[in-house]
Image: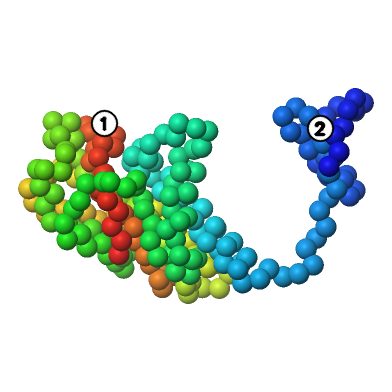
Amino acid sequence: MARLYNQILGDPSGTLGNMVFRIRKGADFIAKRPSPRSTAANNSELAFRGKFGLTGKIAQGINSVDVLKEVWPTSTGRASKFNDIFKANYKLINSAENPGSAIVAPVFGFNAANAVLTAGASGIHLVTDALGVNIGVDTGVEKFLVAAGIVVLNNPTLENIATNQVIPFKSNQHNLDLINPVDLTADFSGGTLAMYESYTDKKVFACLVTLDENGKAVHYSSTFNS
C-alpha cells in the first residue's frame, strides 16, 4: 500500500482500474485492487459465514425491541449496544442450522419458575408461576409487565427466501402482578405472520421485563427458550 502526498485533484476515494484509493484518518492511500477469488469457500468458511450472519440477525432483532435494548447497559467504550448483543450471542450460537442457545437480555436477570415458552400457530405464548415478592421488584415504581424476545426461523417452506430469519416481538403490557401466574401472548399479523408461517422450525428466546408508569424498562428476567 502506498501513501499519496500533494495530490492535485483533491482527496481521491474509490476504485480506478486496478487501484483502490482510501482515506484513513485524513491521509490518502493507494492499494492494489484485490484479485477475485478463484476457489470456492470450504465447509468451515461457509459455517462461519452462516453463524456470523445469523448472529447479526439475532442482534438486530433484539436491538430493535425498545424494552430489550434498554436493559442492555451502555458500553463504556466505543462499542454500541448492538455490538455488545452480537458478542454475547456469537459465543452461544452453535450454527446457522442449529442455533442452540441465545440470550435476549444480559445475564443475572430475576428467575421465573416453571416457564413454558411456546411458538403457536400465529404467535408466541409465555406462562410462568407467580413471580413472588422476593425478586427485587419495587411495585411503587414498576407497574407493568411484558414478554419480549425473538423467534429464530429455519427450514423455509418456500423457494427463494432466506434459509433463516429472525422475528422480534413484544407482548401487550399487563399490570404487574406478583401473586398470580404470568400468562402473556404476542400475536403476529400481516407480513410478519406470513413470514412466520413460511418456516417449519421455530426457536423462541424471550424474557420478562417490568416497566415503570412511562413504559420504560426497569428489571428483566433470565432468558427462556422454547
Q: Residues within 10 Å of mark 2 (few under 14, many from 20)?
A: some
User: Which quadrant, please, contains the C terminus?
Assistant: bottom left
160 to 57, vertically: above or below: below
Tell me residue 50's x, y (percent): 55, 63
- For disc 2, the marked residue is 28
The quarter of the image holding the N terminus is: top right
Q: Position of residue 221 (x, y in %)?
A: 25, 48
User: In this orientation, which residue lies closer to the viewer: 193 or 17?
Assistant: 17
Instruction: Mark 1 vs mark 2: give the one in front.
Output: 2
- Label 1 SS: loop
Q: From the viewer's perspective, is residue 25 above or below residue 172?
A: above
Task: Answer whether residue 194 is visible to the viewer in this image.
Answer: no
- In the image, taking residue 110 as reference, residue 149 lies left or right, namely right
Q: Quadrant of residue 181?
A: bottom left
Q: Residue at x 87, y 45 (%)?
A: 19
Q: Amino acid at mark 1?
A: Asn
Residue type, mark 2 in image: Asp
Instruction: Find disc 1 in the rendering and name its residue.
Output: 214
Q: Quick one: label 1 or label 2, which is nearer the N terminus?
A: 2
Residue in front for this viewpoint, 189 or 65: 65
Q: From mark 1 to mark 2, how far is it between C-alphas?
A: 49 Å
